Amino acid sequence: MVIIWRRRVTEGTSWCKMFHVAGSAQPINCSILNWTIEETYIVVESSDKFDTITVAGTNYSQHGGTFNITNLSPGCTYNITFLKQTYTVCNISLHTKLQSVSNVKAHAVNTTTLSVSWTAPQGCYDGFNIRINPSTLTSVGNVTSYIMNDLKPGVTYRIEIITFRGENASNPSASQNGTTNGLMGVIRFVLADKGEKVIAEVIGDDPR
């Protein structure tokens, strides 16, 4: 899924300026900037013909009003400077998309506990949220395993992990099911009317 933001940049904002460039009769304006953001690249489009933009010390040239900023890290913040000749016209900050975790695993510890683990993503992030079934959300911080307590015996839970940084969140990971152990069967012995044969009846969940 691609996320697109549109933000109008006007004179007087904290990150837009207007300049008269030598040889130009009209002031240069940031006008409208459109950008498309993914995990490792940003595409910026503008109706103004900027000469270059600078991101993390790297200069990018425009192609038909489009700048392709590549080789970025997921979830990180990048300050982008727009230049016309040698003049700074705009400065903006954009965040690449957060990467989801991978390799989610869940196994039962006992009748009320599951152990969950996962492989951390690349890039920048603050921590992880665990979503269960899917309404319960628990923040677990910057770890790659977690013990889920106070669950119900013999119940299967659908588990997803979400990466977060500040108020930004990744797409949920691929879901993984985890099932707690069932209760030990309640055994009732019944003496038969005839003979002394013992009949065992098991009531409850299979403890396996």
Image (tube, helix red, strand yellow):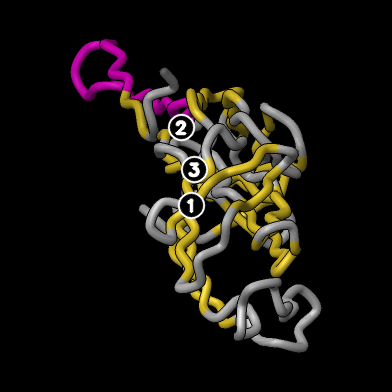
Image quadrant assignment for residue 2: bottom left
**What residue is drawn where x is 54% and y is 25%?**
108
Q: N-terminal of the two: label 2 or label 3?
A: 3
Q: Is residue 187 magenta?
A: yes
- Compared to residue 17, the image places residue 37 above or below, namely above
- Classify mark 2: helix, strand or loop: strand
Identify the residue at horizontal 22%, vertical 12% (top origin): 195
Label 1 Cα crowd, 10 Å radius (few <14 / some 14-19 / many 20+):
some
What's the residue type where badge 3 is placed? Glu
According to the picture, the residue beneath numbered tag 3 turns out to be 160
- Viewer-side residue, 121 vs 136: 121
Tags 2 and 3 touching, CB below 8 Å: no
What amino acid is found at the position of numbered circle 1 in the picture? Gln
> Label 3: few (<14), some or many (≥20) within 10 Å?
many
Front-lying residue, 75 or 66: 66
Tag on residue 62?
1
Q: Outermost residue toward the right?
A: 14
Viewer can see residue 203? yes
Tell me if residue 151 can be seen: no
Q: For mark 2, what is the residue?
A: 178
Inspect the image, locate mark 2, and give the three-letter code of the amino acid beneath it: Gly
- The alpha-carbon separation of the residues under discs 2 and 3 comes to 11 Å
Residue drawn at point x = 42 percent, y = 25 percent = 187
Residue 34 appears left or right of 201: right
Extreme residue toward the top, this view: 196
Q: Of label 1 and label 3, which has the lower sequence position?
A: 1
